[in-house]
Each structure stands twice: as structure tokens, then as C-alpha cells.
Amino acid sequence: MASMDYATKANLLDLEQVGKDLLDKQVTRVNTDTGKVEPVIGAGSNRQALTRFAEQLVKERKQRVKNFSEGNT
């Protein structure tokens, strides 16, 4: 990947590609005991995890809107 010091078209395209590539990789976390990056078993890809997170946010927002409209703040 090229240096990101300059917002050139090429650097922005490289950054976009890095993001797209990350979406299809497995979800990982840093093990705080070892400092190593480890896969999260059963979490799927980053794309799948982001989709689940977005669905959760939508569900929570709908519940907050419903509670607000019913006067349950």
C-alpha cells in the first residue's frame, strides 16, 4: 500500500481496496494476554459481523422510537 500522506486519487483507491479486502476476512481480536491477533470462531467475516451489528442498531432504534411515541422515555 502506498504512503497515505497525500490524498491522491491513487492513495484513495488503495485505501478503498484495503477496506474492501478487510470486509471478506474473518473477524479477529487481539488476545490481551499474548498480544497476538486471533480469529473469532463462529463470527464469520467482517462483512457478516457489520451486517449483524447494523441490524442490531436498527432494532434498538425502532424500540427507542416506539418507546418515545408511547411516552416511555
Image: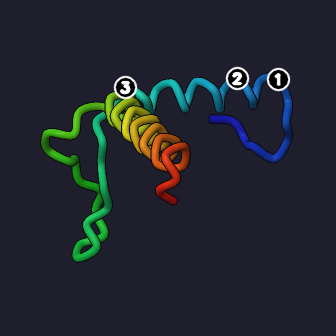
| Comes first in the chain, label 3 or label 2 | 2
Q: Is residue 54 above or below residue 33?
A: above
Residue at the image point whose x is 85% and y is 40% from the top: 6
Q: Nearer the viewer, mark 3 or mark 2?
A: 3
**Of the residues shown, which amino acid type is indicated by label 2?**
Leu
**Image quarter of the N terminus:** top right
Give neighbour class at mark 3: few <14, some 14-19, many 20+ (Cα, 10 Å).
Answer: few
**Of the residues shown, which amino acid type is indicated by label 3?**
Asp
Asked if the residues shown at circle 2 and circle 1 are in contact, with their CB atoms under 8 angstroms apart, the answer is: yes
Please give left or right for residue 53 compared with residue 35 in the image: right
Q: Quadrant of residue 30?
A: bottom left
Residue at the image point whose x is 37% and y is 26% from the top: 24
Please give left or right for residue 18 compared with residue 26 in the image: right
Marker count (numbered): 3
Per the image, the residue denoted by label 3 is: 24
Please give left or right for residue 52 compared with residue 42 in the image: right
Give neighbour class at mark 2: few <14, some 14-19, many 20+ (Cα, 10 Å).
Answer: few
User: Secondary structure beneath disc 3?
Assistant: loop
Per the image, the residue denoted by label 1 is: 9
User: Secondary structure beneath disc 2?
Assistant: helix
User: Secondary structure beneath disc 1?
Assistant: helix
Per the image, the residue denoted by label 2 is: 13
Name, please, the residue furthest toward the left: 41
x and y percentages locating residue 52 in the rendered image: 34, 34
Real-space Cα separation, disc 3 to disc 2, in angstroms: 17 Å
Q: Nearer the viewer, residue 60 or 29?
A: 60
| Comes first in the chain, label 1 or label 3 | 1
Please give left or right for residue 17 compared with residue 28 in the image: right
Q: Quadrant of residue 8?
A: top right
Asked if the residues shown at circle 1 and circle 3 are in contact, with their CB atoms under 8 angstroms apart, the answer is: no
Real-space Cα separation, disc 2 to disc 1, in angstroms: 6 Å
